[in-house]
Image (cartoon, helix red, strand yellow):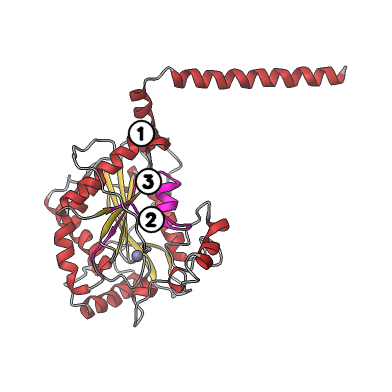
Amino acid sequence: MRIYLIKFIAILVLLTSCGQLNRGKSTHQSLTKKERDEQALNEFVDSPKEVKPKIVQPFKNKAKVSKFCKKTALFFKKYRWKKSNCEKTHWKNVRNSNSGDPLIWTVFGDESKVGERGVESTLIFCGVHGDEITPIKFCFDIIQHLTKEVAENPGILKGKLVAIAPIVNPDSFMKKRPTRTNKNSVDINRNFPTKDWNKDALKLWKSRYRRDKRRYPGKKSLSEPEVVFQVNLIKRYKPRKIISVHAPLTMLDYDGPIDHHTGGIVGTRANQLLIQMSKKARGYRIKNYPFFPGSLGNYAGNERNIPTYTLELPTSNPRKSDKYWTLFRPAIHSAIMHDMRKEIDVAVKPASSKATTAN
Ligand SMILES: [Zn+2]
């Protein structure tokens, strides 16, 4: 009798779950393709309100950051760049690098709105590889540009939020001879906790990259403070797009949602922005570059469907910094201002080619 009762309950549970599955399917099938696309887009851009992260208050002249700004100023002098305005910037800081330098970021826009519907949030990283000198000046240029824009037109960033981390890897940038890897000799663009990390990161590094010291992914993923820093900024600001600035591969690369992941519309719109950025930078080269175990493009773009753009400046020559900023300012400005929910009217299709070196 007991066995019959258990069987009966099991069949009941099975029937109920089948019914749920079928109901789910029929609702989905009753939508037109356009409706499905719109639904996918809304799910992507307006994910349900989550618990809000604690807002880190900006501060001025906190001793550690103030000291770091003075140190930064020495490098600006060394590279004959104009003033950094580091001391005047409202920085935020939670954690430090392995050497104890503060990992800093600054925010434009209303941070209290993060996670709410309709907030266009952009996250920008520079100086991930310490020997790529030009990107660091580039982020300070973005900060000065936005400071000026907001002063002239206080409403310009309404509904938008921009978070900028200009020196993600200070230990390497501030060495006498800057290096790609961090203080622990880890390539922090191979240390993100991607799903393939445990299986492939060290294996590929040993076989395909022949234990290239410049691309060492670390003993385990997320072992480095500079990676925890980036992961936490992604969690905190839920960006609709990420721009990471590198050098010197001379290209714009895109990692992010592809059509069959999102019903078609998100990947298409993210690609439109890629093309627009290229057009606004005098047709800068677009390359379809692969992503790697532990890379930002894999972690944010591939696994989390956050459109992730890698801007590889043409060289690391610090004397070219002004030239690069002049070339890319319109592209960066339009990317920050662009609302990912809206279409862009672009006619050109991105060229795709295989890359051979690694960013
Ligand atoms: Zn790089």
For marks 3 and 2, the one nearer the N-term is 2
Q: Please give the name of the residue rendered at 49% of the width and 70% of the height, measured from the top-left corner.
A: 210
Ligand 1 has an atom within 8 Å of the beta carbon of the residue at disc 1: no
What is the x, y in percent for residue 281? 17, 54
Q: Residues within 10 Å of mark 2 (few under 14, many from 20)?
A: few
Q: Which residue is mark 2?
A: 56
Q: Amino acid at mark 3?
A: Gly
Q: Please give the name of the residue rendered at 37% of the width and 75% of the height, measured from the top-left corner.
A: 179
Q: Which residue is mark 1?
A: 264
59 to the left or right of 206: left
Residue 89 visible: no
Local secondary structure at mark 3:
loop
Q: Amino acid at mark 1?
A: Gly
Residue extending farthest left: 152
Local secondary structure at mark 2:
loop
Q: Looking at the rendered structure, which numbered label has been put on residue 160?
A: none
Q: Please give the name of the residue rendered at 68% of the width and 21% of the height, measured from the top-left corner.
A: 14
What is the x, y in percent for residue 67? 32, 75
Q: CA distance from mark 3 to mark 1?
A: 12 Å
Ligand 1 has an atom within 8 Å of the beta carbon of the residue at disc 3: no
88, above or below 33, in the image: below
Where are the magenta residues, as a range?
287-314
Q: Amino acid at mark 2?
A: Val
Q: Which residue is mark 3?
A: 256
Position of the C terminus, as image quadrant, is bottom left
For marks 3 and 1, the one nearer the N-term is 3
